[in-house]
Structure formats: structure tokens, C-alpha cells
Amino acid sequence: MDIYARLAAFIPKQSCVLCTEQSVFCVCAECEASLNIIHHRCRSCATQLHNDLHFCGECLTQAPNFSSAYTLYQYDGSCAMLIKQFKFNNRLCIGDFFAHKLQEKYQNIVAEFGEYDAIIPLPLARNRIRKRGYNQTDELLRVVAKKSNIVIDQQSVRRIKATRALSRLNLAERQLEIKDAFSARAMNYQKVLLVDDVMTTGSSMSELAKVVRKAGVQSCDVLTLARA
Ligand SMILES: [Zn+2]
Ligand SMILES: [Zn+2]
């Protein structure tokens, strides 16, 4: 048996949650290729663009409080299904798959645009963590935490107000709903990366960026697994 065959024997095989094929992760390479990656996105908020511009209309009218947003997938089809399975049915093997993908994306961003001083996950309301038993963003950042020296700061910002779903509200209503949802203590970082699983309207992230910048951080970027 050569070294690769011997090593391969140690890699646990699981069946793909989408097609049941045996695979290293519980999403096989073929199903992974079916996830919708859109490259033409707003440079500011990562929404999909349907024209030749670099920014969407909403960002041109009122730029968010973060500088650049990055995302891996469009939130639709199998991607939306996988994220829901992970979040609501405790399928941690899906979280493991996404955590590896998020780490690859993070490495690419850092290689291209430079290091961050810290990662701040979007804080969840406490009762949501209690209900679910864990914070899914911790799971998503597990591989980043293991493979790089970045500080993952979960202490400096707290969620102080639970909010209703923002996706059905208009921009003004969203801003009102999310206002004062976070509180932060003073921070010494220059540049931080805000992380969440899905960005829908960008209002929560923009509010988080506002609070973080008020607490002394000079600039914020955003990384999410998926963008609606
Ligand atoms: Zn598959
Ligand atoms: Zn935009």
C-alpha cells in the first residue's frame, strides 16, 4: 500500500447529505460544484449585480458602514438547504464542510488584501444560542481559528436587543429595527472582519460595523458564507 492509500484509509468517509455518494466531507465534490457562485457582485455589499457597474443602487445611494463584503455562495437552491439543515437540524457535518470552505476564502482575502487584527462574529441574541445549543458562527469559524493566529473576539460586542426578521422591511424600517441592537466596549484594532452565515439585507452588518467603528476600529469588512 503506498503512502497515499495508507493516508486515505485514515480519512473518514461519510455519505453526501445531498446525493448519498461517499465523500471526505458530507457534501461531495460534485454537489459542491452545484452551489451557486456568482462572481459579479457589488464591491461594497456583495449583492449580485445584473449590470456592468461595480456598486449596487442601494450602496450608491447610501454606502454601508463597512468597506467591502465578501461571500462564498448565492443563498439559493442546495446552498440554502444545506445552511438550513446545519442551523436548524444540528447537522454539524455540514458546518464542518462550510468551515473548511470559509477558511479557504479567508486565506484568499488575507493573501490579496492583507491581514485583519481580529474577527468579530455577528453576536446572536442569547435566547437563540440557548435554544439551538450552540452559536453556528463559532462552528463556521472553527477551521479559521485552528489554522491561523487571528483573534476571534466574541467579548467586545454584545447583542442587547432581539430584532424581528429584517428581510420584509424597507431600508428605513430595517435601520430603525436594528438601531441600538449592539453595544461594544472600546477596541484597539485597526481593521476587523465581521462574520456571519448569511447576509440578507446587510442592515445588521452595517449596524454592527457602525458600533464597532464608534468603539475605535478604523475599518471593517464583512465575510459571509452566503448572500441572499
Ligand atoms: Zn453529493
Ligand atoms: Zn451594494
Image (cartoon, rainbow, N blue to C red):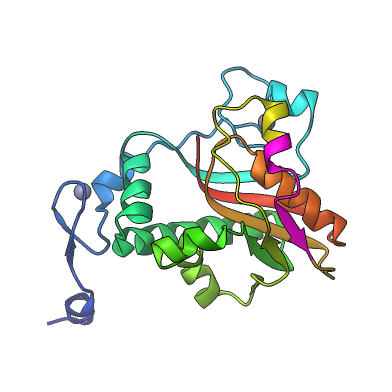
Which quadrant of the figure has residue 175? top right
Q: Where in the figure is residue 55, as x and y percent of width and height?
A: 70, 27
Q: State whether residue 225 is above or below residue 77.
A: below
Quadrant observed for ligand 2 in the rendered image: top right
Q: Where in the figure is residue 23, as x and y percent of width and height?
A: 20, 60
Going by the image, does 9 lie left or right of 78? left
Q: Where in the figure is residue 184, as x and y percent of width and height?
A: 77, 63
* Total number of numbered discs in the rendering: 0
Going by the image, does 217 lie left or right of 73? right
Q: State whether residue 38 is above or below residue 179.
A: above
- Residue at left 66%, top 71%? 153
Location of the N terminus by quadrant is bottom left
Which quadrant of the figure has residue 120? bottom right
Q: Work out whether residue 97 or residue 195 is closer to the camera in this orientation and state it.
A: 195
The answer to whether residue 141 is seen in the rendering is: yes
- Residue at left 26%, top 45%? 31
The answer to whether residue 55 is seen in the rendering is: no
- Residue at left 64%, top 39%? 202
Give the magenta range.
176-184
Q: Work out whether residue 149 or residue 87 is closer to the camera in this orientation and state it.
A: 87
Q: Where in the figure is residue 142, as x and y percent of width and height?
A: 48, 70
- Residue at left 65%, top 64%? 119
The verdict on residue 163 being magenta is no
